[in-house]
Image (spheres, rainbow, N blue to C red):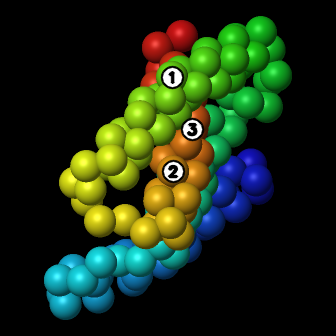
Amino acid sequence: MNNRIFFFIAFIFFLILSLSMLLPSLITLTEPGYRLYPTIMLTVISFSWWKLYPQFQKKDERMNYIQQKSLVYTFFFTAAYLVLVLINNQFTLIHLNTEDTISLLGSLIGSTAFINMLILAKKY
């Protein structure tokens, strides 16, 4: 149970950190910067581990199936993210520099994997 408490504390810490990085950019109406995206990803990962920790302790066939399906879905979402980035680079719909693009892609991929696990754990 101590590990679950650790994940909850990490979730609260990263949530406060993300909000403290997001709030000034919302007040001043500026871009939040590429350092915000990994902290949001860590918030999602901490929340997912906190929610799924009792089920992951069992290490049964169900959890292996959920992890495999999550990775398959994440692959397709990653392909869609890359297509959207390529379209954005071609037509410059949203101005993103290289650091922002890489940070955003990495954070989206990591968050998608764990959100898929949450959804699939609820479904199966």
Secondary structure beneath dot 1 equals: helix
The quadrant in which residue 80 appears is top left
Q: Is residue 2 above or below residue 50?
A: below
Image coords of residue 43 (percent x, y): 52, 59
Residue at 43% x, 69% y: name it.
97
Name the residue rendered at 69%, 17% in the picture: 68
* Residue that mark 1 sits on: 76
Compare marks 1 and 2 and give the one earlier in the sequence. 1
- Residue 25 in the image: state x and y as whole percent: 28, 83
First reached walking from the N terminus: tag 2 or tag 3: 2
Q: Residue at x 76, y 53 (%)?
A: 3
Q: Residue at x 57, y 52 (%)?
A: 106
Q: Nearer the viewer, residue 49 or 111?
A: 111
Q: Is residue 80 above or below residue 69?
A: below
Q: Quadrant of the C terminus?
A: top right
The numbered mark, 1 or 3, whose residue comes first in the sequence reads 1
Reply above or below: 97 against 50. below
Q: Nearer the viewer, residue 101 or 123?
A: 101
SS state under label 2: helix
Check contact, mark 1 vs mark 2: CB within 8 A.
no
- Contact, mark 1 vs mark 3 (Cβ under 8 Å): no
Q: Secondary structure at mark 3?
A: helix
Judge whether residue 116 can be spotted in this image: no
- Tell me the kind of residue under disc 1: Phe
CA gap, disc 2 and disc 3: 15 Å
Badge 2 local density, few (<14 within 10 Å), some, or many (20+)?
some
Check residue 114 in the rendering and tell me which mark sits there, or answer none.
3
Labels 1, 3: front one: 1
User: Which residue is disc 2 drawn over?
Assistant: 105
Would you call the spot at circle 3 few (<14 residues within 10 Å), some (14-19), or many (20 or more)?
many
